[in-house]
Every structure is written in structure tokens, then in C-alpha cells.
Image (cartoon, rainbow, N blue to C red):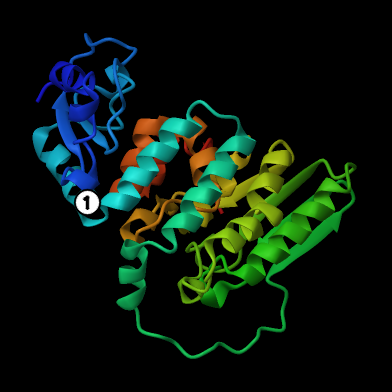
């Protein structure tokens, strides 16, 4: 199907509603050449649109861009495994592309909290083996060192690859609030102890939320993402190793992000039946654009540091 043919079918409400996973269409693949109208006519499809063409010429109706038919089929296969999460991600990115940061975070929280109670996430949970409770760690989850007008924040769970747990979220929020309350601190470095910056959300805590409304309220009340956005010009993340999920979603709020040559970046949430939930659809979106963010999130692709620099996901390479 060409994009022009899709746009023609979307003009009919009866035809448009068939482009949905609920009607057996998890996604649609179209070819485009940049000659299509920039403003789509009719209703938007309620499934991801995978376009084959040049990303620089992608029209608004296209959600994710592939350069070849084979690559488009790979993206389509990833979508088909978690069609509701993929559909929700596309709706969220379309909305957030037009929204301010506060509205992006609000929409992301609603989407993430809803999907936590969906069948796709519950199926992913059911495939995991339960682990015994971990012993409490007496050391702080986040270290805050202040030296005059400079500060260093260190994610301090190296044995857990700095997994972003509730404990770490609370500690990071507390440290960021200290910076917000201390305007004399001009610059703060954010780093991770051990082998990597952060391997993302603590998977052992996934599935603990039993009430979607309460989960949303909790995310809105204590938000490291909102604090990172507020401090974007003062906090300088220095990334290394694995930067997965929250491990890139939070740093991406900063106005300047540097990374070591061994850094790599992954958004795995759709493969769990979720969407990025630590602010990634607010922070990464303006850095790399909707189409590249959709590709990262839908496929869970591992993005190396050179590609990240080329895309604008990071701003600089550093050594050591």
C-alpha cells in the first residue's frame, strides 16, 4: 500500500476504524516519497504506520521509518508481539509531539499506569520467576557530594547495575530537590557507580502496582523526571556502559549529556507490554524526533554511542 492509498481509506470513518489491533491490524506498512500532503485528511489510524522511505521526508501520518521492506517487516513483527502497547506508544508520541513537557509527562503516566494492568504486561509478568525479597542495603542509594558551587550525584547500587528501584527514585528525587533548593550550586554531575550508569527499572519490583489510579497518582506526586527538567541546565549526566530505560530517559532531560565510548542505549518497555515510563516520551522526543524514538521503543534496538551522538540523543563523548 502507498501512503496516498492509506490516506484515501482514512477519509471514511468506517474504513479508518479497521486500522486497529482490535480489528486484526496491529500495524500497516506503506511506501512514501515525500510528495504526499503534509496535513493528513480524515481520521488517524489507531495502529502504528511503518513507512518505507527517507526519514527526512516522512509525513505526519508515518510513525516509524524503515529504509527497506525487510526492515519494515522486522518492525512489524515486533509490533505484532505487543500490539496494544505499540498502539498506545504511537498515540502517546503523536500527542506528545504537540505538547509541552508537563503535558507529556501527564500523558505518559496515564498510558504507563493503564498498561500495567493490561494483558500484555500481565503475560510478561507471568513468564518471570519470582525472586525472594532482597536484604536492605544500608548504604545510600544515591550519593550527593557538594563542594562549594559544584556537586556530584552518584547512583549507588553497582551490585544491582544501578537498577532504578523505588528506593533509588526516592533518593534521586531527594538529591535533586536539594539542588533545586540550593541555587548557589551552579553545576552538578550525575553519574553511576560501577560497570554502568543504569540498567533501567528494577524488574523485581515490576507488577507491584495493583491500582492503576493510585499508580498514576504516585508517579505524578514524586517525579524525578519533572525535577530533571527543572534542573536541565544545571545537571550534567556523564554516562557509561548500559543506559537502559530510565538510564537514558532521565539523563535526556538535561541540556547537555556526555557519554563514554562504551555506552549503549535501549528502550525495552514495549517488549514488556508497556511504554517508556520514566519520562522518555517527554525527554528523548525533542532530542531525536518521533520517528527515531518510535523505532527505539518498538524494536528495543541497542543504539551505540556513535549513533546516539549522530542522532542527538547525547551531545558529547568523554573519556574516563
Disc 1 secondary structure class? helix
- Estimate the x, y position of residue 135 in percent, counting from the top left: 61, 89
Q: Position of residue 31 (x, y in %)?
A: 14, 23
Image quadrant where one finds the N terminus:
top left
The front one of 310 and 48 is 48
Mark 1 closeness class: few <14, some 14–19, many ≥20 residues within 10 Å: some
Left or right placement of residue 251 versus residue 34 in this view = right
Quarter of the image where one finds residue 19: top left
Closer to the camera, 309 or 56? 56
197 shown above or below 99: below
| 185, above or below 2, in the image | below
Query: In this rendering, would 197 be left or right of 227?
Result: left
Q: Residue at x 87, y 46 (%)?
A: 149
Q: Reply above or below: 256 against 118.
A: above
Residue 125 point in image, percent of width and height? 36, 73
Disc 1 target residue:
78
Query: In terms of depth relative to the viewer, which is nearer, 203 or 141?
Result: 203
Q: Decide if residue 47 is in sight here.
A: yes
Q: Is residue 166 left or right of residue 269?
A: right
Amino acid at each position: 500500500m502507498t501512503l496516498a492509498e492509506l490516506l484515501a481509506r482514512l477519509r471514511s470513518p468506517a474504513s479508518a476504524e479497521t486500522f486497529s489491533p482490535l480489528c486484526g491490524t496491529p500495524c500497516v506498512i506503506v511506501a512514501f516519497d515525500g510528495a504526499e500532503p503534509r496535513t493528513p485528511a480524515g481520521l488517524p489510524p489507531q495502529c502504528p504506520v511503518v513507512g518505507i522511505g527517507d526519514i527526512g521526508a516522512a509525513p505526519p501520518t508515518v510513525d516509524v521509518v524503515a529504509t527497506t521492506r525487510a526492515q519494515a517487516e522486522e518492525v512489524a513483527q515486533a509490533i505484532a508481539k505487543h500490539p496494544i502497547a505499540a498502539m498506545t506508544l504511537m498515540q502517546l508520541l503523536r500527542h506528545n509531539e504537540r505538547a509541552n513537557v508537563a503535558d507529556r509527562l501527564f500523558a505518559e503516566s496515564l498510558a504507563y499506569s493503564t498498561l500495567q494492568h493490561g494483558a500484555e504486561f500481565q503475560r510478561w509478568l507471568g513468564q518471570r520467576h519470582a525472586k525472594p525479597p532482597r536484604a536492605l542495603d544500608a548504604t545510600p542509594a544515591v550519593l550527593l557530594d557538594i563542594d562549594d558551587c559544584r556537586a556530584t550525584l552518584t547512583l549507588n547500587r553497582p551490585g544491582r547495575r544501578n537498577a532504578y528501584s523505588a528506593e533509588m527514585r526516592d533518593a534521586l528525587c531527594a538529591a535533586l530537590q536539594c539542588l533545586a533548593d540550593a541555587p548557589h550550586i551552579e553545576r552538578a554531575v550525575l553519574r553511576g557507580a560501577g560497570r554502568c550508569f543504569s540498567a533501567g527499572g528494577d524488574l523485581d519490583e515490576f507488577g507491584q502496582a495493583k491500582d492503576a489510579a493510585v499508580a498514576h497518582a504516585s508517579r505524578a506526586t514524586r517525579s524525578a523526571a519533572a525535577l530533571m527538567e527543572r534542573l536541565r541546565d544545571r545537571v550534567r549526566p556523564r554516562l557509561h556502559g548500559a543506559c537502559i530505560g530510565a538510564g537514558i530517559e532521565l539523563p535526556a532531560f538535561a541540556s547537555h549529556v556526555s557519554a563514554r565510548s562504551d555506552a549503549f542505549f535501549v528502550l525495552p518497555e514495549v517488549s514488556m507490554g508497556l511504554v517508556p515510563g520514566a519520562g522518555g516520551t517527554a525527554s528523548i522526543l525533542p532530542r531525536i524526533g518521533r520517528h527515531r524514538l518510535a523505532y527505539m521503543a518498538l524494536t528495543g534496538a541497542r543504539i551505540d554511542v556513535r549513533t546516539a551522538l549522530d542522532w542527538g540523543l547525547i551531545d558529547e563523548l568523554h573519556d574516563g
